[in-house]
Image (cartoon, rainbow, N blue to C red):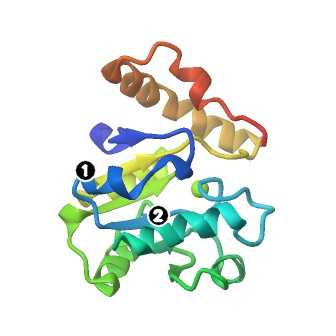
Amino acid sequence: MKAFLMPDYMFASYAEITPAFLRSIGVRALLIDIDNTLAPYEQAEPDERIVHWFRELHENGISAALVSNNHAPRVEQFNRSLGLLAYADSNKPSRKTLERAMRELGVEYGETAMLGDQLLTDCYAGKHIGLIALIVPPIKDKTNLFFRFKRLCERPFIRKYARMRGYRDFMSFWRVKPR
Ligand SMILES: [Mg+2]
């Protein structure tokens, strides 16, 4: 259970994840969370930076699908200009939608990574079916008690990741930065 909450790789932002890096770890398909991973909740559509990032993935032969726990109107509007395979109400950490996305992309477990901002949903969902978990800090977190509690649960795993990778001041990296 605990191993499923341990990210394989952490980045300060999705934009730091390059096709070259993905190739180097044998990944040719990405399942991607939307909220707080690519954009904050209130950003309805992808900005130029996001569009550019997806274009680069595509040009380098990396398949991508959006796998969100948010509802259809949000997911559909965000995906309108991207035109990706996109799944709403995915119910992560359930494995069901991730596996459906992989079937529809035609990709295998060993070559697929899950990218998200939450250990208890994104990381767990990916890792318990053997995917590589790429985790970024939430762009702009909700501040209610439930979310704060979830973040508190994540901390020991982030610390452990930092220790294993030899980062000194990793908690400041993970802390939410307003943009
Ligand atoms: Mg999220």
Q: Position of residue 15 (x, y in %)?
A: 55, 52
Q: Nearer the viewer, residue 137 or 153?
A: 137
The kind of residue on which mark 2 rests is: Lys
Residue 117 in sight: no
Horizontal side of 133 relative to 77 (left or right) equals left
**Crowd around label 1: few <14 · some 14–19 · many ≥20 (10 Å):** few
Is 12 rendered above or below residue 161? below
Residue farthest to the top?
168
- On whether ligand 1 comes within 8 Å of the CB at mark 2, the answer is no
Residue name at image x 61 percent, y 22 percent: 172
Snapshot quadrant of residue 1: top left
Q: Nearer the viewer, residue 71 or 173?
A: 173
Is label 1 in a helix, a strand or a loop?
Answer: helix
Residue marked by disc 2: 92
Query: From mark 2 to mark 1, how far is it between C-alphas?
Result: 27 Å
Residue 1 in sight: yes
Horizontal side of 142 relative to 72 (left or right) equals right
Instruction: In the rendered structure, find residue 115 and report the number of the disc placed on it.
Output: none
Give the quadrant of ligand 1: bottom right
Residue marked by disc 1: 24
Residue name at image x 62 percent, y 70 percent: 51
Q: Position of residue 135 (x, y in %)?
A: 46, 45
Is 135 rendered above or below residue 43? above
Residue name at image x 66 percent, y 61 percent: 49
